[in-house]
């Protein structure tokens, strides 16, 4: 069974208690359950991970590229948190291993502070889902699945 990688960046471990007026009351465990439910219906395994460390996220992205090329994975859903707005290194990692990535943000970053309007991930993302709450994760998995099925 092919897998999909779901990567969460800094502070997303705090979902549920962090600014619920912006991010809602669902926890990261709820996000994981949603991802597993969506993936199961599509016949996919899920690798669900979170790190507060940029280098760790880069290592996971570098490992996933070859797995996609080997047909073991269909790509990654990435909510890079604040690294979205700062990390050339994440941009380079995705581009270097040609990893299919759907960029997800729970909040509508474009309605928020100007520093959240720029993403280093978007130019190397296959697609972007912004502002639809945690439902965005399920939609992203479905999109990666459709893309893999249609070649
Ligand atoms: C976020 C938006 C980012 O600007 C922020 O730094 C996050 C979460 C989102 O999911 O809405 O940590 O990626």
Image (cartoon, rainbow, N blue to C red):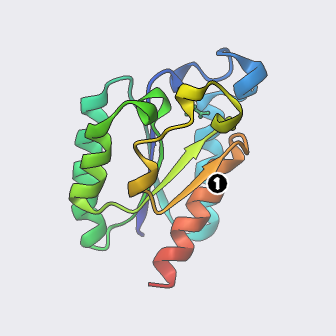
Residue 85 percent coordinates (x, y): 44, 32
Residue located at (51% from left, 75% from top): 147
Residue located at (24% from left, 31% from top): 55
Q: Nearer the viewer, residue 90 or 133?
A: 90
Residue 129 percent coordinates (x, y): 62, 52
Q: Nearer the viewer, residue 39 or 133?
A: 133
The image quadrant where one finds ligand 1 is: top right
Q: Which residue is mark 1?
A: 138
User: Helix, strand or loop at disc 1?
Assistant: helix
Quadrant in which residue 68 is drawn: bottom left
Residue 80 percent coordinates (x, y): 45, 36
Sort mark 1 into few (<14), some (14-19) or many (20+) by Cα contacts within 10 Å: some
Residue located at (67% from left, 28% from top): 112
Residue 32 percent coordinates (x, y): 58, 41
Residue located at (75% from left, 27% from top): 24
Quadrant in which residue 95 is drawn: bottom left
């Amino acid at each position: 069974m092919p897998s999909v990688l779901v990567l969460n960046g800094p502070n997303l471990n705090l979902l549920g208690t962090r600014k619920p007026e912006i991010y809602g009351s669902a926890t990261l465990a709820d996000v994981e359950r949603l991802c597993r439910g969506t993936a199961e219906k599509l016949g996919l395994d899920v690798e669900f991970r979170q790190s507060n460390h940029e280098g760790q996220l880069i290592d996971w992205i570098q490992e996933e590229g070859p797995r996609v090329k080997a047909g073991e994975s269909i790509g990654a859903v990435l909510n890079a948190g604040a690294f979205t707005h700062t990390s050339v290194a994440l941009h380079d990692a995705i581009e270097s291993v040609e990893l299919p990535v759907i960029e997800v943000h729970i909040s509508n970053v474009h309605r928020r502070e100007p520093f959240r309007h720029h993403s280093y991930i978007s130019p190397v993302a296959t697609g972007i889902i912004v502002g639809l709450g945690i439902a965005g994760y399920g939609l992203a998995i479905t999109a990666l699945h459709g893309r893999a099925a249609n070649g």
